[in-house]
Image (cartoon, rainbow, N blue to C red):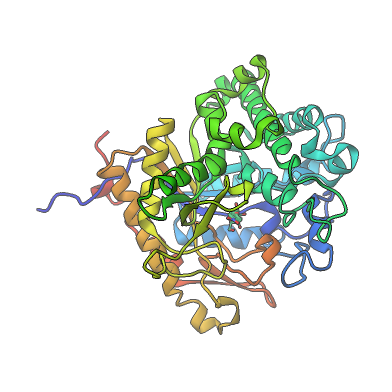
């Protein structure tokens, strides 16, 4: 008999991921308060197709059907986020908790557990209560937002922590700060670019927001560890976006550029949280625009994540130069020196399929941060999918190839490279509200017909279901 080709830890979690604002809709029912994404997505011109998140995939109403489909797929786990303003409509630490919000997620969690699906819960996936933005500037106001976010998280631990054992504090802080307060393309849309926003300062605000987020994350983990962990026995950590950065060529300046790009995209958050300091290169570029932490704050921050939450989609070829501070003064391209493309192009300009980069990134993170990795997002939007008839959409070959590549890379990273990877959550369970792209960019392994809200599994969904995640041959003996 041939030796097993590959192994996975037997408690490895695989399943699909979503986020509250991208799927729920029903934004003004059962006591939910508005979030910054409600307001932002309703401003004409802010989403590509002019559509808001008011309906999305209607999953607040259709959650039982959604869970039935998850069960049909046979997932082991499901990653979703809680809407802060459903739970505390005005958001603040002295504002009332909404019992209907608690009940919705409590029933939702029970429904998953009845089907044997492990809930993997994100506390914050970008939908800040609008009231907190209006009251004190939201993430710009460290002292207020840290307290309010910590109280919200504690309400969640109290209500759901008996059943939820996997928590993510904040989803992709780079996107929150840079896209929301620098480029101004995500809520709340602040930027120095006055054609986009009447308010904002792209040279300072993203770094202030990042600073608040790190502290907010760390305080929530501290509260969990001190007040809940001994009884609830769960794990908690942050999840960071970050793509692999490959030097454009072997020149020393481009090799350095790739590291500089990683410093700005990942190290900004990961170095403080896992290593206890900022990447020195960031300070070189930003000087005193980079807020520092007090010694007391550093103590709370260092070691404040039980694992590394990894969201990754692509690989960039990094070339020194350019004036984009948000990329660490590094130029990104997908075109190799010989003119060829790195991989198959997705609907979004920033995404090409390059599975070797996925394996390289896993190795880089494991060596640098030495902490178990939960892959919490990874996915592909097929170019032109929104214009295709359903019959063609569901044969999503480019997405199948993408997942064939990344799952193979994942198994190699675990088995050949010895990286400790504990989960894989493809993005996304459903086509959904793709933020500023509206509904035209589809990341789902399930097609959603927005006219009827009917769901149609795509080939990629079937492919992932058929990966032998739990075949005994794939288990380690440990
Ligand atoms: C992530 N970029 O966002 C988010 O966590 C999801 O909510 C989102 O739907 C998914 O990836 C697909 O986009 C990103 O510009 C948004 O590099 C933008 C970028 C990366 C990730």
Q: Quadrant of the C terminus?
A: top left
Q: Position of residue 93 (x, y in %)?
A: 82, 30
Taking depth in this image into account, of 473 and 427 the one nearest to the observer is 427
| Image position of 12 with respect to 347: above or below | above
Left or right: residue 14 versus residue 98 is left
Q: Position of residue 370 (x, y in %)?
A: 40, 30
Query: Residue visible at 56% across and 22% down?
Result: 302
Q: Quadrant of ligand 1?
A: bottom right
Q: Quadrant of residue 355?
A: bottom left
Left or right: residue 467 versus residue 234 is left
The residue sitting at the left extreme is 1
| Image position of 303 with respect to 129: above or below | above
Taking depth in this image into account, of 429 and 380 the one nearest to the observer is 380
Q: Is residue 21 visible?
A: yes
| Image position of 407 with respect to 293: above or below | below
Query: Residue visible at 74% across and 66% down?
Result: 47
């Amino acid at each position: 008999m041939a030796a097993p080709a590959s192994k996975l830890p037997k408690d490895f979690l695989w399943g699909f991921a979503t986020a509250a604002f991208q799927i729920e809709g029903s934004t003004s029912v059962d006591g939910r308060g508005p979030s910054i994404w409600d307001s932002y997505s309703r401003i004409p011109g802010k989403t590509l197709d002019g559509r808001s998140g008011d309906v999305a995939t209607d999953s607040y109403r259709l959650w039982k059907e959604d869970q039935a489909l998850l069960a049909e797929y046979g997932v082991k786990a499901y990653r979703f986020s809680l809407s802060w303003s459903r739970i505390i409509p005005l958001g603040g630490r002295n504002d009332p908790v909404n019992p209907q919000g608690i009940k919705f997620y409590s029933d939702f969690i029970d429904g998953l557990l009845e089907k044997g699906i492990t809930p993997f819960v994100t506390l914050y996936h970008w939908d800040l209560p609008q009231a907190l933005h209006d009251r004190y500037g939201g993430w710009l106001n460290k002292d207020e937002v840290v307290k309010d976010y910590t109280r919200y998280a504690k309400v969640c631990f109290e209500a759901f922590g008996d059943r939820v054992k996997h928590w993510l504090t904040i989803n992709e802080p780079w996107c929150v700060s840079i896209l929301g307060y620098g480029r101004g393309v995500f809520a709340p849309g602040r930027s120095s670019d006055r054609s986009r926003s009447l308010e904002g300062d792209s040279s300072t605000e993203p770094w202030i927001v990042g600073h608040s987020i790190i502290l907010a994350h760390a305080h929530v983990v501290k509260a969990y560890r001190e007040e809940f962990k001994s009884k609830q026995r769960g794990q908690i950590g942050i999840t960071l976006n970050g793509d692999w950065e490959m030097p454009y060529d072997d020149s020393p300046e481009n090799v350095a550029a790739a590291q500089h790009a990683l410093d700005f995209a990942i190290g900004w958050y990961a170095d403080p949280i896992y290593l206890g300091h900022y990447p020195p290169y960031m300070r070189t570029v930003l000087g005193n625009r980079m807020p520092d932490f007090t010694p007391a704050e550093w103590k709370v921050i260092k070691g404040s994540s039980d694992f590394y939450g990894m969201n990754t989609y692509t690989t960039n070829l990094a070339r020194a130069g350019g004036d984009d501070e948000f990329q660490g003064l590094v130029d990104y391209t997908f075109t190799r020196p010989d003119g060829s493309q790195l991989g198959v192009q997705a609907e979004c300009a920033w995404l090409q399929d390059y599975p070797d980069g996925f394996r390289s990134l896993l190795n880089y993170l494991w060596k640098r941060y030495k902490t178990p990795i939960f892959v919490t997002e990874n996915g592909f939007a097929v170019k032109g999918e929104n214009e295709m008839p359903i019959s063609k959409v569901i044969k999503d070959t480019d997405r199948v190839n993408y997942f064939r590549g990344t799952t193979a890379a994942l198994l190699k990273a675990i088995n050949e490279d010895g990286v400790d990877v504990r989960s894989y959550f493809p993005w996304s369970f459903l086509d959904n509200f793709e933020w500023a792209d509206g509904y035209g960019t589809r990341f789902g392994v399930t097609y959603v017909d927005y006219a009827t809200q009917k769901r149609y599994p795509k080939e990629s969904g079937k492919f992932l279901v058929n990966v032998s995640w739990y075949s005994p041959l794939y288990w380690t003996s440990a």
